[in-house]
Amino acid sequence: MNIRNITDKFFHYFFLVSGVSAIGILFAIFVMLAMNGLQTFTDVSISQFFLSTRWNPSAFGEPSYGILSLVVSSIMVTLGAMVIAVPLGIGTAAYLSEIAPPFLRETLKPVVEILAGIPSVVVGFFGIVFLGPLIADVFNLTSGLNALNGSILLAIMALPTIVSVSEDAIRSVPKDFKEASYALGVNRWLTLVKITLPAASSGIVAAVMLGIGRAIGETMTVLMATGNALQMPGSFFDSVRTMTANIAIELGEVPFGTTHYFGLFAVGLVLFFMSLAVNLTAEHFTKKYRRYRT
Amino acid sequence: MITSPKVETKNLNLYYTENQVLHDVNITIAEKKVTALIGPSGCGKSTLLRCFNRLNELIVGTRIEGEILLDGKNIYQNGMDVVDIRRRVGLIFQKPNPFPKSIYDNIAFGLKIGGMKNKSRISEIAEKSLIDTGLWEEVKDRLHTSALDLSGGQQQRLCIARALAIEPEVILMDEPTSALDPAATFKIEELVTQLKNSYTIIIVTHNMQQAGRVSDFTGFLYLGKLIEFGNTNILFTRPKEKLTENYISGRFG
Ligand SMILES: Nc1ncnc2c1ncn2[C@@H]1O[C@H](COP(=O)(O)OP(=O)(O)OP(=O)(O)O)[C@@H](O)[C@H]1O
Ligand SMILES: [Mg+2]
């Protein structure tokens, strides 16, 4: 066997082992999550778990394990973030790809992408010291740590993904379509809205889904900025506690092997399936968009 | 020779940044006739064609000198509405480029953008332009399916129908059959011959036979200059210029 054969073999197995172990580790995490999480249901009925709004595992005598308000809080904060980030993100992407002069695009896009690297704890900190007081001030509230605060911060965090992926999608729309539209006497604005954006729509949906995935799993920022009150939120001015924040807050103190302990895993399991659904949707649309590009 | 000019260029020069692509082009396009533009690859045929509906100005760094008169009015003059010009001068591209929309929407799009709201009127026009392009029988049962599922030849005729729907006066065609097979090419050529009853047509082609079959006048471009222009029959049988003769006899390409 010569040297080249040996290196070939070595790299073959090296990549095989690393690939298999990465998948193995992920799978192991999932199994652990499921095994622990599912034990919750020896004590708690499935309907109580999903339909009750009361999460109070340490209540004396009558603990309750309803995750509805946690789920609603997570969804609410995420949707709020999307209401802000989607129009802003698509607008920015359209501006960068279609309107901005090349040099501006070349500088702005990396800047936007760098935003993705800001540690979430820093964003949360910004929420506490700056955005919170501002919200309290503007809306005349006693505290600005609420769902709105969380939504704005998550919007900021999801924005880079949405802008970057949508910009790619918009820019890869064949110029034939745009030229055909211009040749029909359609102006730049209508061409963008009626031709280019629809042609990029699967890529844009994928971008939004990735943004949602980023927002729904985010923990530190919402933990710091939303006040974490255990209650069914009534409006964006209420303090909320998301699924992620709840796990982070309680897991450190919960006695091992109790229903409460398993319950937190069950919350994690639900969260896992929610992110999975979002990511699969994103994947579906990304594939469609790749197919369309070729 | 040409009594009723529809379009005229006067000392037209065009530059892509520093690179001059058209040199002092003077050409007259007769109304309701077919004018062919021929010449070797890269000589500026597409560039000249796209000047006629101001599509070149989308390319950053394009500069134009001289005039292009449409019905005697300079389309490059300040204050001319480019939207209006492009609706009067339609363009068919080399590669069929229907929108990724339904067949019907491809045609309705230009009409709706132009402000037409009446649905039944839009359907009427869509039907008429599909009939005019010979596509109606082939697609009438699938008007609301994607235009991208049509064959190449059908797509190109749809693009022509899309252009016809907004009732242009001039139709520019940039090698409209180069991506098509002989049968589809034949259909398009037939169509061109019919369309000249109502439209002024300028067609770029690499195919000498095609130029001979469909056009009334032919212009030969070489390195951005209009070398020779004249009646198609005469230009192909008795060219005045040596260059033209060499080109049409296939001695360079
Ligand atoms: N967007 C552009 N930027 C810079 N130069 C260009 C651009 N488009 C075309 N050119 C140049 O202009 C010249 C004429 O190009 P044009 O496309 O008009 O040629 P053509 O006669 O249509 O050729 P073909 O028969 O291959 O289509 C070429 O030298 C080409 O390199
Ligand atoms: Mg060309």
Image: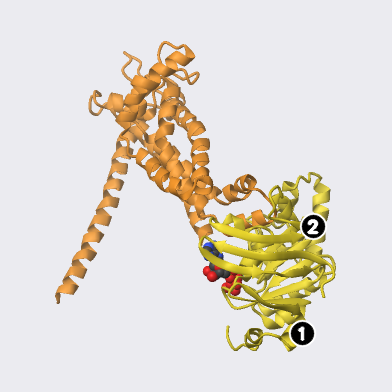
Q: Residue at x 50, y 18 (%)?
A: A234
For mark 1, does the 10 Å Cα neighbourhood hold few (<14), some (14 to 19), or many (20 or more) residues?
few
* Residue at disc 1, secondary structure: helix
Of the 4 image quadrants, the one containing the C terminus of chain B is: bottom right
The hue of chain A in the figure is orange
Q: Is mark 2 within 8 Å of ligand 2?
A: no
Identify which residue, B98 or A111, lies in the foreground. A111
Q: Could you tell me residue B100's position as x and y percent?
A: 62, 56
**Label 2: how many Cα within 10 Å (few below 14, some 14–19, many 20+):** some
Colour in which the image shows chain B:
yellow
Residue located beneath label 2 in the image: B167
Residue A292 rendering spot, x and y as whole percentages: 53, 58
Q: Is residue A123 above or below residue B6?
A: above
Identify the chain of the residue marked 2, using the numbered disc in the image.
B
Q: Where's residue B67, x and y in %? A: 69, 60
The residue labelled by disc 1 is B234
Chain-order first, disc 1 or disc 2 = 2
Q: Quadrant of residue A33?
A: top left
Query: Secondary structure beneath disc 2?
Result: loop
Residue shown at the point (29%, 24%) measured from the top left: A250
Residue B220 falls in image quadrant: bottom right
Spatial CA distance of label 1 from label 2 is 32 Å
